[in-house]
Amino acid sequence: MKYDIHGTTLQTLDIHLNTGESVFTESGGMAWMRGNVEMSTNTRGGLLKGLARSLAGESLFLTTYTCQQGSATVTFTPEAPGSIIPVALSATESRICQKDAFMVAEESVALEVHFRRKLGTGLFGGEGFILQKLTGPGIAWVEIAGEVREYTLQAGETVKVDPGHIAMYEPSINYDITRVKGVKNILFGGEGLFLATLTGPGRVWLQSLPLANLASKLMQYMPMKSG
């Protein structure tokens, strides 16, 4: 499937469809479209799966866009300044993503909920117990706030990360939480009590601007209600 990504910090994604080709996205995810395109909205897998997806930051309903004749272009835009990342997945290959990262995907891609099994990672991992899981075959596109850096970790190699900066990783990565050492580091280091520990083998994608950090900064400039 052909696609183009335009822009820098406020990107747009054009997906070019031929007759019979389809993509699906969360409700309200489409920005504009050209050509003979049919929209179909449903819970995609039933009510229970829709409710589970909503816990992972997506809408209860998903919308499928199908080219009916000739060629068509459907354009999608992210919800915040950042990067649109194409994720090409072979059969049974998966990625674990932060909440609300899913943008759009080919019909053959499965969008599921991923539960963190360890209590510590769920409580202190920055995104809670519930994440998103994308499984191929096919191409999916995710939206990540800020810029994105990709790292390949060898077996046993570890990187420690402020949990909010973890955008996506391969299932082979071991995700754990470690407590920051030293009272002064905890009280004055500005990183909180815990750091995420990612251990290879596998790839990880880290973001420069967690949405929680952006929201916190913007709150400083919001007018306070009196009374």
Image (cartoon, rainbow, N blue to C red):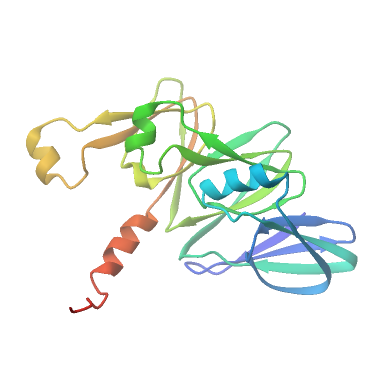
Residue 130 picture location, percent across and down: 48, 39
Please give the name of the residue rendered at 68% of the width and 47% of the height, measured from the top-left corner: 47
Residue 84 picture location, percent across and down: 56, 58
Residue 152 picture location, percent across and down: 48, 34
Q: Quadrant of residue 206?
A: top left
Q: Is residue 4 above or below residue 135?
A: below
Please give the name of the residue rendered at 25% of the width and 74% of the height, measured from the top-left corner: 221
Left or right, 166 with reference to 55: left
Whether residue 112 is visible here, answered yes or no, is yes
Name the outermost residue toward the right: 69
Q: Nearer the viewer, residue 196 or 9?
A: 196
Number of numbered discs overlaid on the protein picture: 0
- Quadrant showing the N terminus: bottom right
- Quadrant showing the C terminus: bottom left
Q: Quadrant of residue 29?
A: bottom right
Left or right, 50 with reference to 199: right
Whether residue 158 is visible here, answered yes or no, is no
Q: Is residue 162 above or below residue 147?
A: above
Residue 168 picture location, percent across and down: 49, 42
Please give the name of the residue rendered at 49% of the width and 25% of the height, measured from the top-left corner: 201
Please give the name of the residue rendered at 70% of the width and 31% of the height, measured from the top-left corner: 92
Name the outermost residue toward the top: 156
Left or right, 160 with reference to 94: left
Name the outermost residue toward the front: 227
